[in-house]
Image: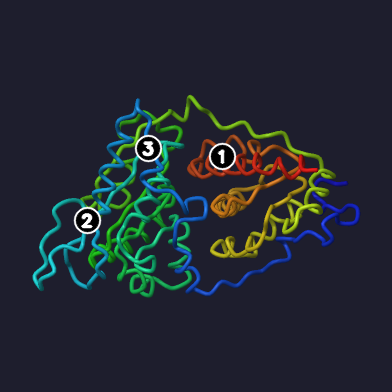
Amino acid sequence: MSPSSPASGPTPIAGTAPLSLCAREPRVPADRLVAEMVPPPRFDSVRFSTYIPDPNQPSQSEAVRVLEDFATGLDGAPAATGRRGFLGLGRSRTPKPPAGPRGVYLDGGYGVGKTHLLASLWHATPAEPSRKAFGTFVELTNLVGALGFQQTVQTLSGHRLLCIDEFELDDPGDTVLVSSLLARLVEAGVALAATSNTLPGKLGEGRFAAADFLREIQGLSAHFRALRIDGEDYRHRGLPEAPAPYSDEQVTRAAQATEGASLDGFPALLEHLARVHPSRYGALTDGVAAVCLTGVRPVPDQSTALRLVVLADRLYDREVPVLASGLPFDRLFSEEMLKGGYRKKYFRAISRLTALARDAARLVDAP
């Protein structure tokens, strides 16, 4: 079988043929994009109490304390238009200036639990789920693309809290767009919280990525308190070793034996992603129990690579295992890509796809 050919095999063991992501062209209404701005399933149950600080890293315990206090200050009252206290303070017609920064930025490297803490803040904030939002930087830009800038401002202005995970520092255009959006939301009294992964090449430089973050959101710098979260250095951990790929036949058989699994040739899937807006990648995986791919090979160009990064994020959020043949996931991106401006995204995608590949081992090992 050619590695790039869609997998085929014997009569499906599960009784029905596997799904195909390439056959799906989801249409996602804008209101669903807003409704889905909650912590992903992987972080449904996380809380501050489930975050276990490293006793050798006091900054982790300090971050929990500060974020718990920050959540307590958000009283759940609807945000009002005009300039009012950022934490819901100052209920009179004459707003009182906020006592401290209007937002928090979690500053640290990979694997120190920033998303866990950000999701815990969302859960701890005393407001109805419809009055607080959680999404990645990419999901926020996709929302602006779907609703338009003014409608997005109007939709989010009534929120108590907006959490932005993985704030991107490598796309100046989108960063300026989101900075303008956040400025409008701050005026409406919306609290902000954000994270951004440290670039591997910048570890050890001052306060990690904090200076980059505050510079990129120029007008909002004064509204953010940067919380440094120290932890195991990414350079010392290195990328997790990707499990060895399976054969085309093993992947095909597992897809046929697993109810709700999809089965696609990797090159065909990459082509299909170019025809589906990234805001729909979550819907693309609706109801999919596992993603099975044959013929994994290096991505051919940066545009394709960035689309794959978004798909990897959505699969990781939904805890969908990924079983593959071909090359291991740590060889998806060229050395040039891993040294370029988008390397943060590529490292994240490798890490997440590798974790999902480990999860998928049970599909082959199952009797």
Alpha carbon of mark 3 to alpha carbon of mark 1: how far? 17 Å
Image position of 281 (left or right of 324): left
Q: Quadrant of residue 273?
A: bottom right
Alpha carbon of mark 3 to alpha carbon of mark 2: how far? 24 Å
Alpha carbon of mark 2 to alpha carbon of mark 1: how far? 35 Å
According to the image, label 3 marks what residue? 108
Q: Quadrant of the C terminus?
A: top right
Q: How many marks?
A: 3
Helix, strand or loop under label 2:
loop
Residue at image coords 73%, 56%? 261
> In the figure, 1 relative to 102: above or below?
above
According to the image, label 1 marks what residue? 351
Specify which label sits upstream in the sequence, 3 or 2: 2
Specify which label sits upstream in the sequence, 3 or 1: 3
Res. 73 mark: 2
The amino acid type of the residue labelled 1 equals Ser
- Front tag of 3 and 2: 2
Q: Quadrant of residue 289?
A: bottom right
The amino acid type of the residue labelled 3 equals Gly
Helix, strand or loop under label 3:
strand
